[in-house]
Image (cartoon, rainbow, N blue to C red):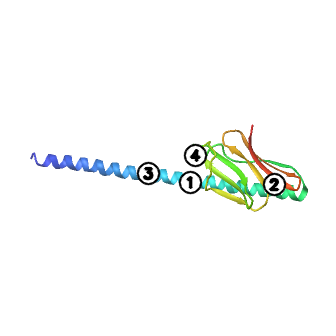
Amino acid sequence: MPSIIPSYIYTLFASIIVGTIVISACGLSTANVKAEAEKQHLSNIAEYVAAESLELISHATAENLTSTLHLNVPQLIGNQRYWIKVANDSDRTWVEVGFGTTVASSDQRAYIPSEVTASGTYISGSGIAVLQCFPEGSDVQLTISGGN
C-alpha cells in the first residue's frame, strides 16, 4: 500500500508542472497578440496622419490657404503613450510614430507623396493633435503640435 501513495503524489506534482507550463504559454501568446495589435494601431495612426496631411497640402498649394486640422487620434494605445512626428529630407516627407514620450527614430513611417517642409512633434496625452499647413513663400510648411 505505501508504494501507491507516492505515485499519486508524483502524478499530482507532474500535473501541476504541466498546467503551469500551459498557462504560461497561453499568457505569453496573449501578450504577443496584444503587442502586435498595438503596433498595428500605431501604424494605422501614421497612415491616417499622412492622408490628412496630403489633403491639407493639396488645399494649401491649390488655393494658397492656411489650413488647420484637429486630428482624431486616441490619447493612449492600450495603456501606452505614443508620439507622432512629421519630418522631411531632400527626397521625402514622412510621418513617423513610436511608443513612449521620448521622440527617437522609428521604423514605423508613412510617407507623404509631396515636397513640403515638415516639422513638429505631438506626444499623446498633451491635448489635441493639431496639424497645420500654410504657404511660406514658394514653399509649403506642414507642422504638427499638441494643442490644449
Residue 91 quadrant: bottom right
- Looking at the image, tell me whether mark 1 or mark 4 is earlier in sequence order: 1
Q: Position of residue 123 (x, y in %)?
A: 67, 43
Q: Residue furthest left?
A: 1
Q: CA distance from mark 1 to mark 2?
A: 29 Å
Residue 17 versus residue 132: which sits nearer the camera?
132
Q: Earlier in the sequence, mark 2 or mark 4?
A: 2
Spatial distance from mark 3 to mark 4, Cα to Cα?
17 Å
Compared with 3, 58 (above or below) is below
For label 2, the residue is 56
Tag count: 4
Please indicate whether residue 5 sits to the left or right of residue 89 in the image: left
| Local secondary structure at mark 2 | helix
Disc 4 target residue: 78
- The amino acid marked with disc number 4 is Gly
Secondary structure at badge 1 equals helix
Q: CA distance from mark 1 to mark 4?
A: 9 Å
Q: Amino acid at mark 2?
A: Leu
Image mark for residue 28: 3
Mark 1 lies on residue: 37
Crowd class of label 4 (few under 14; some 14 to 19; many from 20; radius 10 Å): few
User: Going from the N terminus, do you reach mark 3 or mark 1 first?
Assistant: 3
Kind of residue sitting beneath label 1: Ala
Counting from the top left corner in percent of width and height, residue 81 is at: 61, 43
* Left or right relative to 11: residue 114: right
Tags 3 and 4 touching, CB below 8 Å:
no
